[in-house]
Image (cartoon, rainbow, N blue to C red):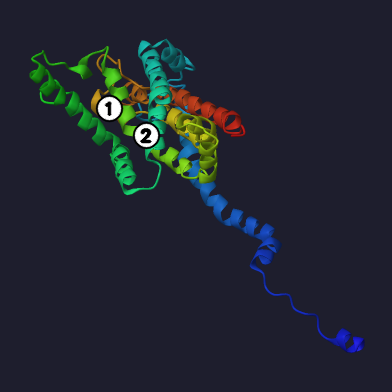
Amino acid sequence: MSEQLASLPPKKEPFSFSAWLSKHNHGNRLLSLIIFLPPALLLFTIFVILPLGEAAYYSFFKWNGYGVPTNFIGFDNYTRLFKHSAFETASLNTLKIIVVSLVIQLPLALVVALNIYKKSWSNSVFRLIFFLPYILAEVVAGLIWRFVFDGDYGVMAGMAETLGTEPWYILADREWAFTAILVVIVWKYFGFHMMIYIAALQGVPKDLTEAAKLDGASRLQTIRHVKIPLIISGIKVSVFFSILGALQTFDLIMPLTGGGPSHSSHSLVTYLYTFGITRMNVGFGSAVGVVLFLACVIFAFTYQNTIQKERG
């Protein structure tokens, strides 16, 4: 009997896709790299590395964008940049956007998300309403609010007429123009961060919140000690997008004020556009672009290697 069993062919193992994938995983990864990596590297080199290299090269020349740059001036563009009062104003304004985003916009988005994250038809309606400003193109949003702030024909004009006061041209006021821009930025983008928080809150296990209620925790205590610690990863992502977006603010400012009045409402990007492109000073604009790129890269690497690497 044992001899008969020994002569039988070995039993064939049933096919397992996971075992096959594990066996051929190294080869598949290598094949994926060969197929997908070269096109990605080519596109990244053409559209990112080469333009950055050219911008760094042009920043050492006084050049209007025509012909081949020949007037080499070294670091004069950078020296002029850091001594320019409008650049100081643009840097301060960009810092204001970051502070307002972190102190007002993100907490507002979190408060709204905590109130409408549960699934219901009414909450869905509110989510749509609050998310609508983010759907609008930045230029369209800027034009809408420019009409709202207009002292002759807009909402501000109507309010002034109703109250019997002189019309207020807020976008032409050096002291208040950028404050108006900050209001529009908060209105435009808080819905995006709200949706990030809603997605994170919907992933919080209900068992934990119910256990907290059974233990006698109030709503605020549940939010502070249960919900917020569990969505801290979403908050970190939201902060990252908020700061990086503040460094790149452009489309909203141009239709509202164009950086005016008297260059008082520039961000770093509108400053680059105004003093580099529109004035045909491509060398100087390249220097601004290099400084802005370095600021974004330093922030991104620092944030991802410190804050986002922390356990949370």
Pick the residue in front: 180 or 265: 180
Find disc 1 in the rendering and name its residue: 254
**Quarter in which the C terminus is drawn:** top right
Residue appearing at x 27%, y 21% in the figure: 180
Q: Residues within 10 Å of mark 1 (few under 14, many from 20)?
A: many
Pick the residue in front: 98 or 106: 106
- Of tags 2 and 1, the one toward the viewer is 2
**Cα distance in 3D space between marks 2 and 1:** 29 Å
Amino acid at circle 2 = Val
Apparent side of residue 63 relative to residue 33 in the rendered image (left or right): left
Picture quadrant of residue 127: top left
- Whole-percent x, y for residue 148 in the image: 18, 27
Residue appearing at x 37%, y 24% in the figure: 272
Determine whether 105 is above or below 86 in the image: below
Any part of residue 54 in sight:
no
Tell me, yes or no, whether the two marked residues, 2 and 1, touch with CB atoms within 8 Å. no
- Whole-percent x, y for residue 310 in the image: 61, 32
Pick the residue in front: 116 or 166: 116
Any part of residue 161 in sight:
yes
Amino acid at circle 1 = Met
Find disc 2 in the rendering and name its residue: 112
Q: Earlier in the sequence, mark 2 or mark 1?
A: 2
